[in-house]
Amino acid sequence: MPPLEGGRHLHLGALDGFYRHMDGMWQGKNPSVDYWLEMETQFLQWLTYARLPDIWNDWAFGWDIRAKQYLPIEGWREEWAVFGVMFDDSILFADTVAPDSPVYWLMTGYGTVENRRLIAPSVAALMQTLLAISDFEQKWQAEGRAVYDEEGCCTAAELSAALHDLLYRELSLECAAGFEEAFWG
C-alpha cells in the first residue's frame, strides 16, 4: 500500500490484500469518505486506508483522569488494525501478526481489551461469511419471505433462526457466537 501521511506504512497482515483490492474500487473525489456495508440484518462502516492510523490511535490511547493526559490503553497492541466500526461505535479489528489475521469485535464502554470477542478465524473467513449472509438474505427476499416482524422493528424470528444456523455452518462455535453477538446482539 502507498505510504500514509508522514511516510508511515502500516503492517496490515491479511488486511493488506483486502485494502489493495478495495483501494482501486473506492477511489473517488474524496479519499477519506466512509464506506458502508448495509444489508437487511447488518450494518458496518469500513474505514478507508487513510483513516486506519487515526482510528488505531483512538483505541490505543485513553484519557486518564488521575494523570490528566492520554495514556496507552493497557493490553492494546500495536499489531491490531482497526478496520470497521459498528452502528454502536464498537469496532472490528484484525491481529495482523497472527496467521491469517483473525478478526475480533470489541464493544465500547467495557474498558478493557480482554472483553474482545473472536468473530472470524481470518479476514478471508469474515469476508466469506458476510458474502454468505448477503446471498442468503437476497434469496430469502426473492422468495417473498418476511425480513422483519409485524411491528417492523426486529428481524423475523424465522430469519433469525436461519441466519443463526448459517453462522454455525460457516464458522467455529466460538467465532459464530462472537459474530452473532457483534452483529445481532
Image (spheres, rainbow, N blue to C red):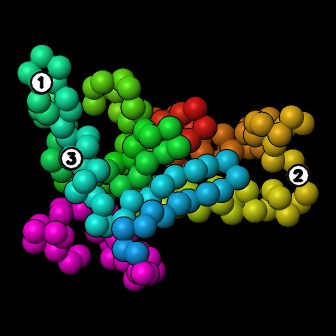
SS under mark 2: loop
113 versus 30 height, above or below: above
Residue furthest front as drawn: 68
Q: Which residue is mark 2?
A: 145
Q: Nearer the viewer, mark 3 or mark 1?
A: 1
Q: Which residue is mark 1?
A: 68
Amino acid at pointer 3: Asn
Mark identifier at residue 141: none
Q: Is residue 27 magenta?
A: yes
Q: Earlier in the sequence, mark 2 or mark 3?
A: 3
Spatial CA span between label 1 and label 2: 55 Å
SS under mark 3: helix
Q: Mark 3 and 1 residues: CB-CB less than 8 Å, in contact?
A: no
- What is the magenta range? 1-29
The answer to whether 65 appears left or right of 185 in the picture is left
The quarter in which the N terminus is drawn is bottom left
Q: Earlier in the sequence, mark 3 or mark 1?
A: 3
Residue appearing at x 11%, y 30% in the figure: 69
In percent of width and height, residue 14 lies at 30, 63
In percent of width and height, residue 46 lies at 44, 59
Q: Give the class, few, some or many, for how many residues have Cα within 10 Å of label 2's Cα (few <14, many ≥20).
A: few
Residue appearing at x 16%, y 74% in the figure: 3
151 versus 3 height, above or below: above
Q: Is residue 143 magenta?
A: no
Amino acid at pointer 2: Arg
Q: Nearer the viewer, mark 1 or mark 2?
A: 1
Amino acid at pointer 1: Lys
Residue furthest top as drawn: 66
Mark identifier at residue 57: 3
